[in-house]
Amino acid sequence: MNLRHYRGLRVPVLLLSSIACAATAQAAETAKPQDAGFNPLEFFAPLQLPAPANAIRDGGGKPGALFWQNRADYDLHATIDPASHTLTGQETITYTNHSPDALDVLWVQLDQNIYRDDARAKFVRAPWRRPGQPVTPTPSTQGFEIASIELEQGGKRTKADYLVDDTRMRVDLPTALAAKDGTVKLHINYRYTVPGTWGGRTAVTPTKNGDIYEIAQWYPRMAVYDDVRGWDTQPYLGSEFYLEYGDFDYAVTVPWDYIVAGSGALTNGDEVLTATQRARLKQADGSDKTVMIRTPAEVTDPASRPKTSGTQTWRFHMDHTRDVAFAASPAFVWDAARIDLPQGKHALAMSVYPVEGASNWVRSTEYVKGAIEHFSNKWYSYPWPVAVNLGGHGAGMEYPGIVFDGYDDKDDKLFWITAHELGHGWFPMIVGSNERRHAFMDEGFNTFIDVYASDEFNHGEYGPKRDGEYAPKGGNPVDEILPVLADHDAPTLMDLADATSEKYRHPVTYFKGALGLVLLREQILGPARFDPAFRKYIATWAYKHPTPSDFFRFMESESGEDLSWWWRGWYFNNWQLDMGIQAAHYVDGDVAKGVAVTLESEQKLVMPVILRIDYTDGTHEDRRIPVETWIQRSAPELTFPTTKPIARLELDPDHALPDADRGNNTSSLGI
Ligand SMILES: [Zn+2]
């Protein structure tokens, strides 16, 4: 998700306005910085992580010998009625209980209910209004209207008893679902009205050549039952998702003139595409350059569709995914190019957008290809057959294999939003952390990998990444983060996503979350230790549900470093950093005997740092001061065997650390 999300919401946007909420005050309580000043015992104290290590999640942060995870496979059919803006769905969920517990109920997520007038989400934030204007009624829908639910257990199909509460539904099982591999099928018939652009993540948007449907959270989805807390049934208040993995078959029935672009592989192109379009897709499949599948001029040409009346059903398949989403419209221009993946594999980059966005989006597919290739080469190979960028009203929202962006974005903004939303393919679509509780493992991790994608794309054409997510003022990130660290009301990265108000969502979750990993990679561990560990973390937890504790343990075990102090200072607290040189002198007053340097820390956080010794002859040498320097002393004195006259000493000469006050970082040895 991204900043752009909120523009489209026009609030009611309501879901996600910029007004602080009562819950934030609570979050801030935990984030109040303690008295400033470094304390070695507090800083280096053993860190008790929130979740214990055990045989399910082990001490090395990996799935343990007894690890289990449940599974949900879906068979879905949606029909869109353009006249009423409704989606009618038939769903079959096959749910497999790998847990050691028999389950007598199932919990299902009904995310469309967030748009109901009585949704809990509407009470979380103050209603948005234009300054000086009266409060206007918040738009709403009826949410999911459930027509029927049937259970299929042991070969018998029966009507299910269920209870809907806000965005959750409990389905009672007459016979408990057996532990260790019991399965049950849920057959659900439903409909809902697609919200307008005020729906944000999912919406219908009018354009010159017809409506664009951005369809997500569109079917009842299984809640996660896990070893961490059993059924995870946090209501949908506007934060993101936590979902089970499985395989999906889905079909979308739309009027004949619609194009559908969705997660996974289109399996009936022979039926829904013209011969020309199939030939162009084949060409794109072998092309590094973007190939037009449907040109702007063809959008209003009936010959660009294989039939000229009635409806068509588009069929898709996607394996190993936690969700599917799609976009449908008669207005789509469509282009594509091949994505080159490691080990000679490939996928297809595609963009669909209305003619209004055609000039802005002319390079969209190039951006999709570049971002996916970068993430795949650097971290973990993209596992799905297509990656689609949709130009819609500007949701700035990610789903597996498809992202919803804005057709009026262009140039660097379009590259950054495209790379960001596609980066979510890795976090949280491949590595399925609980976004609703641990937003930093979603937005922070993704923004971190986006930083390097921007540096690399087309030899740095759009680097460095400087946008609403990362150093928004365009300067040095370690300087721009300082006000966030100094803000006593700011939540920590560990605070609940829903309790983090809009004011802090980007500065803390995205920016501080990403910078934490940049500093860990570049200043604490170094890429040679960070990169293999982070790659292995992704591969180990692909299609699984790691917790923050798993991540912290994994990175320590794999990088070979006890990082308790870093997790404590940056993640569990908003500790500030202000290291300095308190005093410096030649040993015994003799230039030839070396230099003695006393360090100080005015704040609670210290980090490994470079001390640069500039000699009067114009040369310099850099000494790395490890964090252990501070393990027993709050004003450590260090001596270095220098033999030449020193002009100047400087801590952090490359301006790489978030040092609150650089006024005490230099010394000229009293000269
Ligand atoms: Zn995001």
Image (cartoon, rainbow, N blue to C red):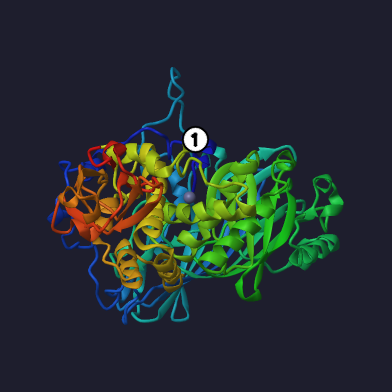
Element at badge 1? loop
Does any portion of residue 217 appear in the rendered image? no
Does residue 141 sit above or below 271 in this rendering?
Answer: above
Q: Position of residue 222 (x, y in %)?
A: 43, 64
To which quarter of the image does residue 554 belong? bottom left
Frontmost residue, 377 versus 614 = 614
- Image location (x, y in percent) of residue 386: 64, 63
Residue at x 74% of width, y 43% of height: 358
Q: 671 or 31, which lies in front?
A: 671
* Residue 244 horizontal/vertical position (percent): 44, 67
Q: Residue at x 35, y 72 (%)?
A: 558
Pick the front one: 495 or 393: 495
- Tag 1: amino acid: Pro
Q: Which residue is mark 1?
A: 139
Locate residue 441 relative to residue 397 in the image: left or right. Answer: left
How packed is label 1: few (under 14 Cα within 10 Å), some, or many (20 or more)?
A: some
Above or below: residue 38 compared with residue 546:
above
Residue, x 87% and y 53% (percent of image)? Answer: 303
Give me the residue at 33% from left, 61% from top: 232
Total labels drawn: 1
Residues 68 and 604: in front is 604
Q: Does residue 495 appear to the left or right of 328 in the view shown?
A: left
- Relative horizontal placement of residue 15, taking residue 279 as reference (left or right): left
Q: Taking 618 as reference, is 395 left or right?
A: right
The CB of the residue at mark 1 lies under 8 Å from ligand 1: no
The percent coordinates of residue 176 (x first, y second) are: 33, 75
Q: Is residue 495 visible?
A: yes
Q: Quadrant of the C terminus?
A: top left
